[in-house]
Image (cartoon, grey):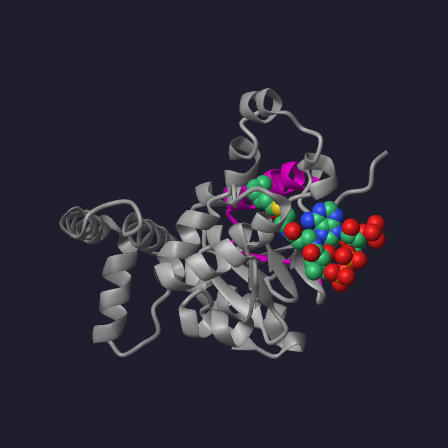
Amino acid sequence: AEETMILTERQGRVAVIRLNRPKALNALCDQLMEELGQALRGFDADPEVAAIVLTGSDRAFAAGADIKEMQSRSFPAVYLDDFIGKRWEAVTYVQKPVIAAVAGFALGGGCELAMMCDLIIAADNAKFGQPEINLGVIPGAGGTQRLTRAVGKAKAMDLVLTGRMMDAAEAERAGLVARIVPLAEVVAEAVKLGEKLGTLSAPALAMAKEAVNRAFETTLAEGVKFERRAFQSLFSTEDQKEGMAAFAEKRPAVFRNR
Ligand code: HXC
């Protein structure tokens, strides 16, 4: 039997998925991505889970797609296999909040995977980059698009054309990273955030995430219209009644996700 390449655990209502292929710095081979997709779909469907934390090791979140596995592939093979579409996009279909807790290298597909998550909490040793150019290729899992939207053209071109890495401080300044915390605290911080989100209304969170993501897909006018309709639709939830009643009654809200 093959070893599994991810570890999963529950910490309260937060599911933690840990990429666990230490000998290859969590290089994202087909098997690992398959297991990751299954875990993400499982936790998204599990009513006991409120949020998902995706992390790696202290040394590497993930050092990219598996170069040794990719190197001899042909165009027809990667094309017909839709490399990397099907296997890699699982995280973008998750409705619950997905928090990347990134320590060490997040390179190539590793950086792209982190950017598919809803937000990135970085350890102070995190390093981000899109070094594909050094391999004679370019980012292939959204790097040229998501990085550009996250940090703007100047930094994106700098990183994608040169392949250089950016440290956690630069990544935060550039807007790629939501928070930087000491290495020893990065997973705990992400879990704590997930727990906090677990006390909020799940439908409101899912709509919030959908609306923010819509900003990357559409015009301002259409995005604002989408947001307004989503906002209005939340007045159909018990959670909206509860949240507003709790405020008026000066007590904490108890959301029931309906
Ligand atoms: C396969 C990898 C790997 C990768 C590291 N390893 N990254 N194997 N694919 N992406 C393996 C090494 O071969 C080595 O195995 C072991 O992990 C430890 O790595 P070292 O290089 O010895 O460590 P270090 O000297 O500390 O350097 C760390 C590093 C370097 C700077 C992160 O490993 C590196 O440059 N890795 C490649 C980064 C990269 O180019 N990523 C983009 C990939 S393309 P052995 O067996 O020798 O001990 C990509 C395309 C995405 O992601 C597009 C969508 C799919």
Left or right of 27 on screen, residue 108 = left
**Residue 37 visible within the image:** yes
> Between residues 247 and 52, which one lies in front from this camera angle?
52
Q: Residue at x 45, y 69 (%)?
A: 178
**Residue 51 visible within the image:** no
> Between residues 27 and 53, which one lies in front from this camera angle?
27
Q: Position of residue 119 (x, y in %)?
A: 46, 61
Q: Residue at x 54, y 45 (%)?
A: 46
Q: Position of residue 257 (x, y in %)?
A: 38, 53
Q: Is residue 56 magenta?
A: yes
Q: Where on the picture, by quarter, is residue 54?
A: bottom right
Q: Position of residue 48 (x, y in %)?
A: 54, 51
- 190 to 79, vertically: above or below: below
Q: Residue at x 39, y 60 (%)?
A: 150
**Which residue ends up furthest to the right in the rendered image?**
1
Give the residues drawn in magenta, as a range: 32-57
User: Count the marks: how many?
Assistant: 0
Q: Position of residue 113 (x, y in %)?
A: 54, 50
> Between residues 181 and 125, which one lies in front from this camera angle?
125
Quarter of the figure that contains the N terminus:
top right
- 79 to 128, vertically: above or below: above
Q: Residue at x 64, y 44 (%)?
A: 65
